[in-house]
Amino acid sequence: MKKLKDVIVDGVILAGAEVNLSNISDNSKNVKEGSLFFAIKGTAVDGHNFVKEVLEKGACGVVVQDKQLADFLVKNYPGKAIVLSENTRKSLSLSANRFFDEPSKGLKVIGITGTNGKTSVSNILAQFYEFAGYKVGIIGTINYRIGDEIISAGHTTPDPINWFKTLKIFKEKGADVVVAEVSSHALDQYRVYGTVFDGGIFTNLTQDHLDYHKSMEDYFKAKEKLFYHILDFNQNPKASVNYDDEYGRKIYQKFKDNFNIISYGKTSPDFKIEDIRLSVSGTEFSFVYKGGKRRIYTKLLGEFNVYNLSASISYLLVDNFDEDFLIEKAKFIKPVRGRFEVLSENGKTVIVDYAHTPDGVEKLLSSVNQIKKDKVITIFGAGGNRDKTKRPIMGKIAKSLSDIVIITSDNPRNEEPIDIINDILKGIEDKTDVFVIPDREEAIKFGIEMAKEGDVIVIAGKGHETYQIIKDKILPFDDLEIAKKYLRRDYV
């Protein structure tokens, strides 16, 4: 139980400073006796429409950003806590931080942002810290876990209440380090604001989420907020950024005077990637750092994993890790579920990957083409109710980097699968060896059955996901398990 005045740090308390609260929420359905309700103006629903309902339901108070409404509530709901805020999203994050006892203090929290690579970098980074003896919590797309204990199912970045609550759980369970994926939506909506970050990693910025951000510039502004947020609560933070990415260079130049910053990439002046050698069994590359050149081997596959590994290693170098230790432990880094995950049987190779953006598909297929023996058969779709402009671009890339393309359904959500497929087809001029099979399992079966010895079948878009979202239903579906079924001919 906390007093309102001890939780509110961003807003004017108009009434009820001494009111006790036992819970905070921005969802009217979760409000109970003693709850403080934050009225958030969302993209579809405005929480201000529910303030009277929640007060009558037993909420101890509300936080609003409408002055006229606040004045009305003070007059008509005596004994209730009424707070006026300029930005209730920001207030919610700062208050959640206080409510859960400022859990990031005393933790080494590292935020990873970018269009692609967040999950891989967070998991690679976590493994290195674990090799060094730290107890590590991960917040990300696959799950929230500490060590081998899974706290909950994943979501790229949770809402502020669950974010700070999870940090508190990690702290109570003895975590030293937390690595977290931080999405552009989360940054735009202040979900992690108030966190004391040790530092941040920027992987890249390519087309995605333009249904939300509207332009690449707005998308970039949301991403760079991570570094502004970090500076608001840490005056000596660390950062690692991809120098080969134009937006990464912008961040490097903008924040180099305020961060202990390092860049990585083929053009990097700090951690320069050279001489990449790819195979189906592992990857080798060199890096130049502080005038010295070292060779590194990893079981991770694909050139994009060279970048993911370099993002992690470069950040750890800034965190004073020993270079020899990192090179030695890189040999033991395990791949992430659903990221360039390889199955081989009957002379055929299946690669399951989460790539669902134009850049992700291009990097995935470029890496596959460097290790293939014969044909590349690509099976993919695109998510419904998401950025439609990327669909034809993905189609064009898939066709140009594959011998055979099978277009299927991904998570169609509330769109018709064939409409999504037709959007993808708009980017493909030559439709020779392009097949349309809306049923995803049938598409995977068709691709594996048509493949010959030496061919690579790439199944892109869903990766680690074990479900498919069709209309309002979430149905069990795992690309990896479906691939195993037909690769091993279990269905015969």
Image (spheres, rainbow, N blue to C red):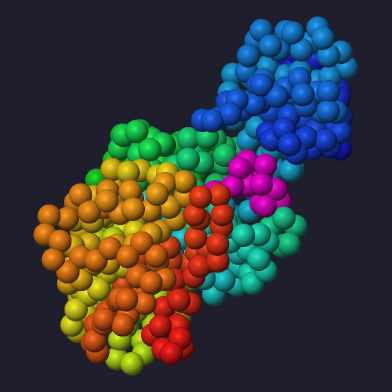
Residue 245 x/y as whole percent = 26, 50
In depth, the one of 32 and 8 nearer the eye is 32
* Residue 7, position as x, y percentages in the image: 75, 31
Residue at point 77%, 24% (across, down):
53
- Could you tell me if residue 291 is visible in this image? no
Image quarter of the C terminus: bottom left
Magenta span: chief secondary structure: helix
Vertical order, 311 against 441 (above or below) = above
Q: Is 299 above or below relative to 255?
A: below
Instruction: Pick the residue in front: 291 or 340.
Output: 340
* In the image, residue 88 above or below residue 142: above
* Horizontal side of residue 71 vs 283, given as left or right: right
Visible residue check, residue 348: yes
- Give the quarter of the figure containing the N terminus: top right
The residue shown at (78%, 35%) is: 31
Return the residue nearer the eye: 50 or 234.
Answer: 50
Region of the chain picked out in magenta, as a range: 157-168
Residue furthest to the left: 430
Please state the horizontal and vertical placement of residue 116, each as a whole percent of the image: 37, 55
Residue for point 48% across, 35% down: 188
- Location of residue 59 (image quadrant): top right
Q: Give me the residue at 68% from left, 58% from top.
A: 170
Q: Quadrant of residue 5?
A: top right
Q: How many marks?
A: 0
Residue 213 falls left or right of residue 293: right
Q: Is residue 164 magenta?
A: yes
Q: Is residue 34 magenta?
A: no
Using residue 332 as the reference point, say whether residue 94 is left or right of it. right
Q: Percent x, y for residue 150? A: 66, 66
